[in-house]
């Protein structure tokens, strides 16, 4: 087993970075930083500082929650954090240590 780190960034679909959707900007930053395990999860409902966001046909929200999760080494995560925080100063970001379990290559 190898130790690593999980980085999770909480956004909404309406967030932007310099007139670019935040999702696209963050994926570009992750690629630029050489981060490997990046996934984007779209929430069906969420509660945040601006109230409830839902996919309900009655709500028709264009600001659904997004979670970007990155799994990589602690070193790469720590190197990329200042760049991500600079571009998204108000985003909620969480990190925690993890154990990486991978099948050995043959």
Image (cartoon, helix red, strand yellow):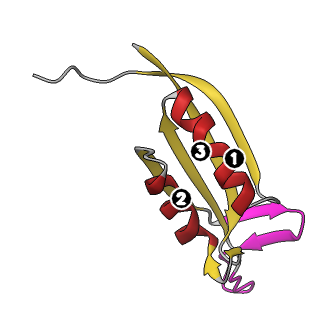
**In the image, is residue 93 above or below residue 102?**
below
Magenta-colored span: 45-62
Spot the residue most to the top. 1
In the drawing, does residue 103 fall left or right of residue 48? left
Q: Identify the image quadrant of the N terminus.
A: top left
Residue under pointer 2: 29
In this view of the protein, which residue sits in the foreground, 64 or 33?
A: 33
Instruction: Tell me where residue 19 appears, x and y as whole percent.
Output: 66, 84
Q: Tell whether label 3 touches label 2 (CB within 8 Å).
A: yes
- Residue 57 colored in magenta in the image: yes
Give the structural element (helix, strand or loop) at label 3: helix
Q: Residue at x 53, y 58 (%)?
A: 29
- Residue 97 colored in magenta in the image: no
In the drawing, does residue 42 fall left or right of residue 13? left
Q: Tell whether label 2 touches label 1 (CB within 8 Å).
A: no
In this view of the protein, which residue sits in the foreground, 63 or 100?
A: 100
Which of disc 2 and disc 1 is earlier in sequence?
2
In this view of the protein, which residue sits in the foreground, 98 or 35?
A: 35
Which of disc 3 and disc 2 is earlier in sequence?
2
Residue under pointer 3: 80
Residue under pointer 1: 82
**In the image, is residue 81 above or below residue 104?**
below
Local crowd at mark 3 within 10 Å, few (<14), some, or many (≥20)?
some
Q: Identify the image quadrant of the C terminus.
A: top left
Q: Residue at x 71, y 82 (%)?
A: 61
Local crowd at mark 2 within 10 Å, few (<14), some, or many (≥20)?
some
Q: Tell whether label 3 touches label 1 (CB within 8 Å).
A: yes
């Amino acid at each position: 087993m190898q130790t690593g780190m999980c980085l999770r960034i909480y956004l909404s679909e309406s967030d932007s970075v310099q007139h670019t959707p935040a999702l696209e900007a963050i994926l570009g930053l992750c690629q630029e930083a050489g981060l490997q395990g990046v996934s984007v999860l779209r929430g069906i409902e969420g509660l945040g500082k601006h109230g409830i966001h839902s996919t309900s046909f009655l709500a028709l929200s264009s600001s659904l929650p997004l979670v970007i999760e990155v799994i990589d080494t602690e070193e790469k995560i720590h190197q990329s954090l200042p760049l991500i925080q600079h571009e998204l100063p108000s985003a909620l970001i969480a990190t925690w240590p993890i154990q990486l379990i991978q099948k050995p290559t043959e």
